[in-house]
Image: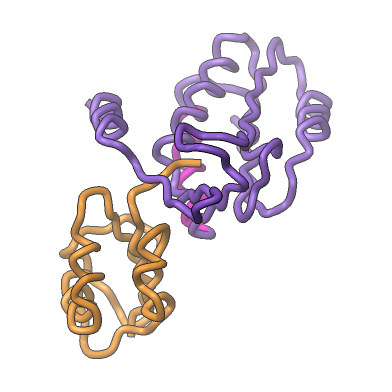
Chain colours: A orange, B purple
Amino acid sequence: MPRLLFFGQLRDRAGDLHERVVAGDARTVADVLDWIATQDADLAAALKVRGVRVAVDQSFATLEAPVSAQSELAFMSPLSGG
Amino acid sequence: MTEINIIISHALIDVAAELVTLDAEACDIGASASFVGYCRGASATGAVRALSLQHYPGFTENVIRGFAEDMAAKHAPQKIIIRHRVGEILPGEAIVLVAATATHRAAAFKVVETLMDYLKSEAPFWKQEHRADGAHWIEPTDEDYARLQQRRS
């Protein structure tokens, strides 16, 4: 099952969903978002705001991107820069 | 071929040692340029006790390397070094060092400036300011988004 990571302010909001493994049969990023919505609707809404980006296995991805059981999904808050 | 050396770390940056090493290892260059960014004790919103910088290990380095490789392809510097702190950073401490060596100064200056613009705006870091009233995440403003749009068009 894919593993979730959150960065920036999203990590504060994600709470114990950070580093959690997704339950069920998610095949795309969109499926993972649907699952997150069942766990925390507010967080799921926050993942759709401007500037939030997602990476699958350390490559930027779209909602249609496939995920596997071994995937690592990172949801990134808008970048602050260094 | 350009040598690109990137370290993202919690450790303090020894700016002097890094620059001495960079120049000592350079061969037949005409120029060396560098920039150091420091943690300030105040921002537009008041006194800053500390910064916290978060990154995505592996991903952040790879994304920065991709941009540095683009710079190398365009300007052919001999070497690029990037040192970036993460974790807690106190006022007065160096957050970032970018330096480049090249045959001519134009390339060295351009690489350093462009990399710094990139690191400040697009590199995958997330920053919190710690002030008297608590921790505050720094997020892009509407102006930042507009400037980014301009740079990409």
In the figure, is residue B83 to the left or right of A14?
Answer: right
Residue at the location (42% across, 46% down)?
A: B138
- Whether residue B112 is visible, yes or no, is yes
- Nearer-the-camera pick, B136 or A19: B136
Percent position (x, y) of residue B51? Answer: 57, 48
Residue at the location (34% across, 40% down)?
A: B140
- Whether residue B62 is visible, yes or no, is no
Image quadrant occupied by the N terminus of chain A: bottom left
Residues drawn in magenta: B58-71
Percent position (x, y) of residue B86? Answer: 60, 51
Q: Is residue B92 above or below residue A49?
A: above
Q: Is residue B135 above or below residue B106?
A: below
Q: What is the magenta segment's predominant secondary structure? A: helix
In the figure, is residue A76 to the left or right of B117?
Answer: left
Residue B149 in magenta stretch = no
Residue B67 in magenta stretch = yes
Residue at the location (83% across, 34% down)?
A: B17
